[in-house]
Image (cartoon, rainbow, N blue to C red):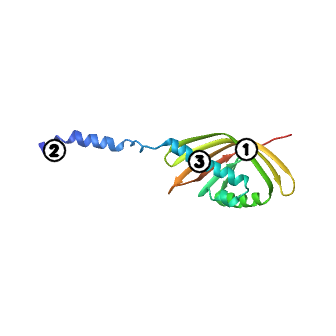
Amino acid sequence: MNDGLWRYAPLVLALGACADRPRPQEDVDLSRVTAEVTAAVQAFHAADTARNAEAVIGLLWPEYSMLVDGRRLGHAEIVEGAREFMAGLETFHTEWTDLDVIPLNGSAAVASFQFRDSIITAAGDTIRSHGPTTFIWTRRAGDWRLLFGDADHYPIRR
């Protein structure tokens, strides 16, 4: 290197150091993310209580997986199970409380809540349960859908 280029060495080192640092995220309106994910959770709840399996499935990304009572289920199992489950119900009442939406960035958020279900099957059996649910929502091309879920069901005995 000739003597004239040495004077640029500090600038080159500084630029190199900046390139290795994480860049600050774009300005994201986290309150907008929270509102959009809250609306997506409400749409999921409405589809669930309407026993609309296709609407529920429409809120899942193809790589969706879920941990249900300690058992991991993939997208295909969830799709088949949702259709079968919804078809076998007479009524499905569920209350979701304590909703907390945590936006991670402009395209991902965690939503958690407590549920309390009262289900009457087509055979006339009543099933009551409660427990926590956690969802990971992601946005692609403007659509919020579920990437992962976790739910634990505890029986309500009366």
Say above or below: 106 vs 63.
above
Nearer the observer: mark 2 or 1; the answer is 1
Q: Name the residue under label 2.
A: 5
Q: Mark 1 points at which residue?
A: 95
The residues bearing labels 3 and 2 have C-alpha atoms spaced at a distance of 51 Å
Earlier residue among tags 2 and 1: 2
The residues bearing labels 3 and 1 have C-alpha atoms spaced at a distance of 20 Å
Nearer the observer: mark 3 or 1; the answer is 1
Nearer the observer: mark 3 or 2; the answer is 3
Q: Which mark is residue 136?
A: 3
At horizontal 32% and vertical 41% (from top left) the residue drawn is 18
The C terminus - image quarter: top right
Q: Name the residue type under label 1.
A: Glu
The residue lying furthest to the left in this view is: 3
Say above or below: 24 vs 83.
above
The residues bearing labels 2 and 1 have C-alpha atoms spaced at a distance of 69 Å
Residue 87: image quadrant is: bottom right
Earlier residue among tags 3 and 1: 1
Mark 1 Cα-neighbour bin, 10 Å: few <14, some 14–19, many ≥20: few
Position of residue 65 measured from the top left corner of the image (x, y, whole percent): 63, 53
